[in-house]
């Protein structure tokens, strides 16, 4: 018997979970209003298995990388587009202390597969303490992925481009009903906007505004991603993307002059050249969670309502593995991992 799901939101989370469920034979319908302030639409799309705060592997890095390899190349083939771009990442080391710590990490057997033996700064980059190279990094063209899947699903009639009206959702013994649609479950994949829903307003999702610049320069050339607290991502043809800023409590999602000047200042510190030519600026809100773990699971009082949210700035790396895991949970093939289970915040709903 076919299972069915109504997904609210077609950002990165909704797109990949919807794709995974469709692959498994589910009937899927998605609702999305294509909000321009979505972090997915302006995302840098970077992935990187190393934490520069601890100089260790990020959470479940090996598992997440494997799931990415099974997901994004398959989506690229389905779309006929180059959306998946593995690239080395160069960390511009900020001090002698960080350089020494990097050298120490290179002797760690767990990190050896992820760190190059040596690296040279690109010409035109100010790196007095050198650079360290991270392997198995890269970027996904998230806007192209979302636009491509949106077009396919609109044509297939399984995506409605509209605002979700929560008051129109009815839940009964036979499933959820929404404007003539019936599904076994409703899954909120709406990112930071889930905090404004009646169903999941109790979850601690905080919108964190990020802004990025696209610029052109001929003063340096790099085929690697650069990280120096911010990032520089090569797009080809002398074009680069730089970001990102972080701001909690921002009033709106419009790009700001303050963020533009901050990023330009940071670029000039590392590029040793005149101010680059800015050709674009974009902003959006990330869904951040206090413990930096996703918020997955069914509503404690309504088991047909589900959350697939809270992926934050590492969404490109987290979502493919979590989509497979949550599809297994929905099909009762696995138990939900405690670290991502929204039950950890149950007291916010039932003090």
Image (cartoon, grey):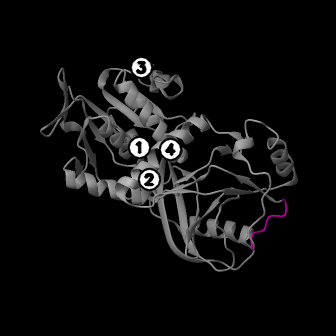
Judge from the rendering whether residue 160 lies leftward or rightward of residue 202; answer left or right.
left
Q: Residue at x 47, y 21 (%)?
A: 347
Discs 3/1, front: 1
Badge 4 marks a residue whose secondary structure is helix
Name the disc covering residue 350, or none: 3
Residue position for label 1? 13
Q: Residue at x 49, y 48 (%)?
A: 286
* In the image, residue 172 above or below residue 250: above
Q: Quadrant of the N terminus?
A: top left
Discs 2/3, front: 2
- Residue 160, given in percent of the width and then of the height, sits at 22, 50
Tell me which numbered mark, 4 or 3, is placed earlier along the sequence: 4
Name the disc covering residue 68, or none: 4
Judge from the rendering whether residue 239 lies leftward or rightward of residue 118; answer left or right.
left
Q: Does the magenta-highlighted stretch encompass residue 125?
A: yes
Residue position for label 2? 40
Tell me which numbered mark, 2 or 4, is placed earlier along the sequence: 2
Which stretch did the figure color magenta?
124-129
Q: Quadrant of the C terminus?
A: top left
Majority secondary structure in the magenta region: loop
Badge 2 marks a residue whose secondary structure is helix
Residue 82: image quadrant is: bottom left
Tag 1 and tag 2, C-beta contact below 8 Å: yes
């Amino acid at each position: 018997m076919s299972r069915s799901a109504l997904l609210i939101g077609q950002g990165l989370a909704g797109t990949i979970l919807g794709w995974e469920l469709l692959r498994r034979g589910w009937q899927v319908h998605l609702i999305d209003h294509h909000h321009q302030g979505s972090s997915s639409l302006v995302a840098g799309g970077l992935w990187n298995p190393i934490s520069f705060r601890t100089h260790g592997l990020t959470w479940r890095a090996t598992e997440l990388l494997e799931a990415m390899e099974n997901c994004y190349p398959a989506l690229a083939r389905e779309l006929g587009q180059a959306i998946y771009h593995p690239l080395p990442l160069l960390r511009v080391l900020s001090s002698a202390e960080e350089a020494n710590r990097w050298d120490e990490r290179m002797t760690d057997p767990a990190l050896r597969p992820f760190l190059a033996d040596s690296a040279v700064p690109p010409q035109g980059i100010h790196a007095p303490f050198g650079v360290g190279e991270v392997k198995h990094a890269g970027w996904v063209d998230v806007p192209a992925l979302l636009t491509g899947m949106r077009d396919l699903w609109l044509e297939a009639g399984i995506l409605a481009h509209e605002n979700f009206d929560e008051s129109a959702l009815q839940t009964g013994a036979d499933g959820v009903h929404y404007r003539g649609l019936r599904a076994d479950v409703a899954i909120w994949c709406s990112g930071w906007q889930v905090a404004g829903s009646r169903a999941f307003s109790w979850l601690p999702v905080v919108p964190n505004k990020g802004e990025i610049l696209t610029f052109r320069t001929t003063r340096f050339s790099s085929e690697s991603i650069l990280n120096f607290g911010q990032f520089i991502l090569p797009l080809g043809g002398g074009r680069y993307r730089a970001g990102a800023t972080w701001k909690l409590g921002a009033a709106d999602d419009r790009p700001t002059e303050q963020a533009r000047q901050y990023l330009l200042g940071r670029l000039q510190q590392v590029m040793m050249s005149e101010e680059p030519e800015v050709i674009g600026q974009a902003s959006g809100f990330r869904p951040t969670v206090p413990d930096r773990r996703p918020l997955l699971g069914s509503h404690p009082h309504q088991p047909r309502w589900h959350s697939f949210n809270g992926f934050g700035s590492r969404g490109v790396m987290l979502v493919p593995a979590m989509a497979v895991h949550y599809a297994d949970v929905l099909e009762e093939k696995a138990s939900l991992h405690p670290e991502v289970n929204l039950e950890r915040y149950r007291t916010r709903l039932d003090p």
